[in-house]
Image (spheres, rainbow, N blue to C red):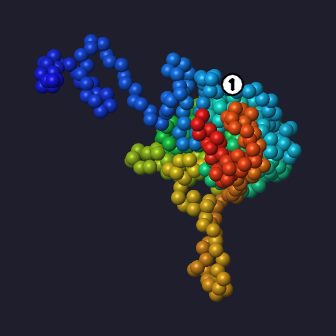
């Protein structure tokens, strides 16, 4: 029988510290410090994984799937085949390629960085062994619309909207890749949740109610420079001005301006604001501003001010510099301002914006007297931008995806019409749910 009283009495006399691990309270009598006990992540399963293998483990949470096939048991899993998939760029973005699997342009991916994939796409690309996506008809429609706006941009921005997992981020990324390969200036932000979730440093600005985010802003400038460096060199500033202690002449280009902001992070906000003013008004090179998770621009952030009050997104200087383009106050002379919504984290989707984006269906009244009564008719929601709804997968697109999954050894069963019809109906044409349905046991 264990005598706990004597043990605690001797521990107190020797002044041995107590160590707490989880719910168990233990005595640390070792002269060396004890190793830190890592809490078990119950969202991660270690089933069917050999403990002596190095590398990443299988992580599956919700509909996200990440698999390192290099660690897979060869008895149960085959190696990823090397498929030849055509690259998606300005030359290959044509109507004839709608309904085909294509790779995102390598130069664009190198510019944004491999860690800057939107949503779950990074995990999907690891599973595929390549950054491959389906080139849909709606993708071709977006490309055609952007090509039409290269001559004269619209006065209002547009926002891609649809159900969670419908492919909004994928469509935005594909369009940004095509625009970058065609020599346009691309301002691409794959995620803006990190701008408002208090995960990045911020500081109050002197003599203003705004707050600066120098790290995020300088990172955005680096992305713009890496993706559009050649295009930036074609646009001269057109006027001389000073930023800090640096004087820029009218012969300098937008590339010089962005480079100065990258190497001077303290002035990153000033450089970005000058850049947006010059890039949006020039007519030499078309501009594509592609902002994912744009609903965060109107949310309440997780940051707080000096009085411990929650900061609205509009008080962050980075968001305030981009917000006028989505509220109709600014536009680009040539090009397009395009955003995409995200419903993954409801915390950053304002309720009033959600109601405007997804209004209840209007039911016409049969009685003409009631139909003419303004008190009974719900007013149409007014938004400062146009909404582009991303549609569900067609049966043909689901067939193409299932064949691709089969060729990548993700689906082992033969792809038949019955199998595709079953998966397509069970997922309601949602690409993310279709992918989750075939990767359940991976």
Report the residue marked by disc 1: 79
The structure residue drawn at horizontal position 16% and vertical position 23%, both measured from the top left corner, is: 2
- In depth, the one of 113 and 86 nearer the eye is 86
- In depth, the one of 284 and 391 nearer the eye is 391
- In depth, the one of 289 and 22 nearer the eye is 22
Q: How many marks?
A: 1
User: Is residue 75 toward the left or the right of residue 96 in the image?
Assistant: left
Q: Quadrant of residue 98?
A: top right
In the rendered image, residue 218, in percent from the top left (x then y), is placed at 61, 33
In the rendered image, residue 183, in percent from the top left (x then y), is placed at 81, 37
The structure residue drawn at horizontal position 24% and vertical position 22%, both measured from the top left corner, is: 27
Residue 442 visible in the displayed image: yes
Q: Quadrant of residue 371?
A: bottom right
User: Is residue 63 toward the left or the right of residue 35 in the image?
Assistant: right
- Image quadrant occupied by the N terminus: top left
Q: Hey, which residue is sitting farthest bottom in the picture? A: 369
Residue 325 visible in the displayed image: no
155 versus 227 height, above or below: below
In the rendered image, residue 351, in percent from the top left (x then y), is placed at 53, 58
Judged from the image, the secondary structure of the residue bearing numbered disc 1 is: loop
In the rendered image, residue 21, in percent from the top left (x then y), is placed at 31, 28
The structure residue drawn at horizontal position 60% and vertical position 73%, both measured from the top left corner, is: 378
- Image quadrant occupied by the C terminus: top right
- In depth, the one of 101 and 270 nearer the eye is 101
């Amino acid at each position: 029988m264990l005598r706990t009283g004597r043990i605690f009495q001797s521990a107190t006399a020797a002044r041995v510290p107590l160590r707490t691990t989880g719910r168990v309270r233990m005595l640390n009598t070792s002269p060396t410090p004890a190793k830190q006990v890592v809490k078990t992540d119950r969202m991660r399963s270690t089933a069917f994984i050999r403990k002596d293998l190095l590398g990443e483990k299988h992580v599956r949470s919700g509909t996200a799937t990440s698999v390192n096939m290099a660690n897979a048991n060869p008895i149960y899993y085959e190696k990823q085949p090397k498929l030849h998939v055509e690259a998606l760029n300005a030359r290959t973005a044509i109507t004839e390629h709608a309904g085909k699997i294509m790779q995102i342009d390598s130069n664009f991916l190198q510019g944004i960085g491999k860690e800057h994939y939107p949503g779950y796409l990074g995990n999907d690309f690891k599973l595929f062994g390549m950054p491959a996506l389906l080139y849909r008809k709606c993708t071709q429609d977006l490309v055609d619309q952007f090509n039409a706006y290269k001559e004269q941009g619209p006065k209002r921005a547009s926002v891609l909207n649809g159900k969670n997992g419908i492919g909004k981020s994928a469509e935005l990324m594909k369009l940004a890749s095509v625009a970058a390969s065609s020599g346009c200036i691309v301002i691409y932000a794959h995620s803006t949740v990190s701008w408002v979730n208090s995960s990045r440093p911020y500081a109050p600005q002197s003599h203003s109610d705004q707050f600066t985010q120098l790290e995020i802003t300088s990172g955005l400038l680096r992305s713009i420079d890496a993706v559009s460096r050649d295009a930036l060199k074609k646009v001269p500033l057109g006027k001389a001005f000073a930023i800090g202690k640096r004087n820029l002449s009218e012969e300098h280009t937008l590339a010089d301006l962005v480079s100065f902001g990258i190497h001077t992070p303290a002035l990153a906000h000033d450089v970005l604001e000058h850049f947006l003013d010059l890039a949006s008004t020039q007519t030499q090179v078309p501009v594509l501003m592609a902002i994912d998770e744009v609903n965060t621009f109107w949310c309440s952030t997780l940051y707080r001010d000096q009085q411990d009050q929650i900061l609205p997104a509009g008080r962050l200087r980075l968001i305030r510099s981009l917000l006028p383009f989505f509220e109709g106050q600014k536009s680009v002379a040539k090009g397009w301002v395009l955003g995409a919504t995200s419903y993954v984290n409801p915390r950053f989707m304002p309720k009033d914006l959600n109601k405007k984006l997804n209004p209840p269906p209007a039911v016409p009244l049969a009685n003409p007297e009631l139909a003419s009564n303004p008190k009974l008719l719900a007013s149409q929601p007014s938004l400062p931008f146009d909404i582009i709804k991303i549609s569900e997968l067609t049966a043909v697109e689901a067939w193409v995806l299932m064949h691709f999954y089969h060729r990548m050894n993700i689906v082992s069963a033969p792809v038949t019409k019955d199998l595709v019809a079953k998966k397509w109906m069970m997922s309601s044409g949602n690409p993310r749910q279709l992918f989750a349905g075939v990767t359940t046991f991976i």
